[in-house]
Image (cartoon, grey):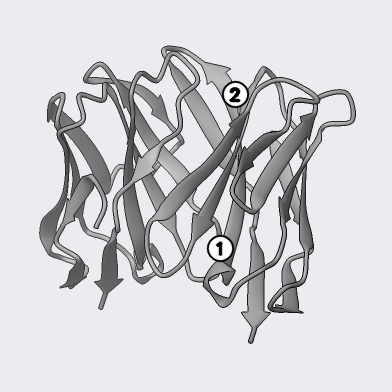
């Protein structure tokens, strides 16, 4: 088990559904990240929040909408996803995005789009 | 565009062997290079390298960075079956208020008994 907790662990949804992925950490980290990882591929950065503000958006389609309600929580709201969005979604956190610190990853949410 | 290339992509060895994994990069505004180990789920942190020529060591694992030639190596000595995993190299670059990571494709290491 990691110190970054992601829920749910698995999610199956239809293309018209709306769902949210949740990520929580209680390490006092002020940078949080969303990655998408397809099978046998490396993680690809989607979003970075630093001090609860969106710092990086890697040209992610608007059907993915991130939210950082406080310093411990990070959500990813999903709407009208496509089958190619099926992947493992990883959340990570680091102490402070402005300085060199390693990222701590959650176990991910495995998302399947029908 | 930032690029991180790992080699080999896969490697099969026997217990007790020593392996060297490679990571080369071409990025703008280098901040750090990190190695992670990924088994079934979350990547776990191994090393962070920021300065050339300083070896980082943890048990049987060690790593070093060459900022002039733009590469890093990860060495594992006396390999064990528990070392079987995907080893990911990530390079962080400076970005507004945050670091931005690009990962290589990973090296899949299989250690046979």
Q: Which residue: 55% across, 56% down?
A: A42
The quadrant holding residue B57 is top right
> According to the image, label 2 marks what residue?
B93
Percent position of residue B109, x then y: 65, 70
Q: Nearer the viewer, residue A98 or A28?
A: A28
**Nearer to the camera, B59 or A28:** B59
Q: Position of residue B82 (x, y in %)?
A: 52, 72
**Residue B39 x/y as whole percent:** 46, 67
Q: Mark 1 near mark 2, Cβ–Cβ under 8 Å?
A: no
Q: Is residue A110 left or right of residue B11?
A: left
The N terminus of chain B lies in quadrant: top right
State the residue at coordinates (57%, 64%): B86
A24 left or right of B55 in image: left
Q: Is residue B104 above or below residue A51?
A: below
Question: In this view of the protein, can residue B56 be seen by the observer?
Answer: yes
Chain containing mark 2: B
Q: Which residue was labeled with disc 1?
A: A41
Q: Secondary structure at mark 2?
A: strand
In this figure, what is the number of numbered marks? 2
Q: Given the image, what chain letter belongs to the residue carrying mark 1?
A: A
């Amino acid at each position: 088990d990691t110190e970054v907790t992601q829920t749910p662990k698995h999610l199956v949804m239809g293309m018209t559904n709306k769902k949210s992925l949740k990520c929580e950490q209680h390490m006092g980290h002020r940078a949080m990240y969303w990655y998408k990882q397809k099978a046998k591929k490396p993680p690809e950065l989607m979003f970075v929040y630093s001090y609860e503000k969106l710092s990086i958006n890697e040209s992610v389609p608007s059907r993915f909408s991130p939210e950082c309600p406080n310093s411990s929580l990070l959500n990813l709201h999903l709407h009208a996803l496509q089958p190619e969005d099926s992947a493992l979604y990883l959340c990570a956190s680091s102490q402070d995005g402005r300085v060199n610190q390693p990222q701590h990853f959650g176990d991910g949410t495995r998302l399947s789009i029908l | 565009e930032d690029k991180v290339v790992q080699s080999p992509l896969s490697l099969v060895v026997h217990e007790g062997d020593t392996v060297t994994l490679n990571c080369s990069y071409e990025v703008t505004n280098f901040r750090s290079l990190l190695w992670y180990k990924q088994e079934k789920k979350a990547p776990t942190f191994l090393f962070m390298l920021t300065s050339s020529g300083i070896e980082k060591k943890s048990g049987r694992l060690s790593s070093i960075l060459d900022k002039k030639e733009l590469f890093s190596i990860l060495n594992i000595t006396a390999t064990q079956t528990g070392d079987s995993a995907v080893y990911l190299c990530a390079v962080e670059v400076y970005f507004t208020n945050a670091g931005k990571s690009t990962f290589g494709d990973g090296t899949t290491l299989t250690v046979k008994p």
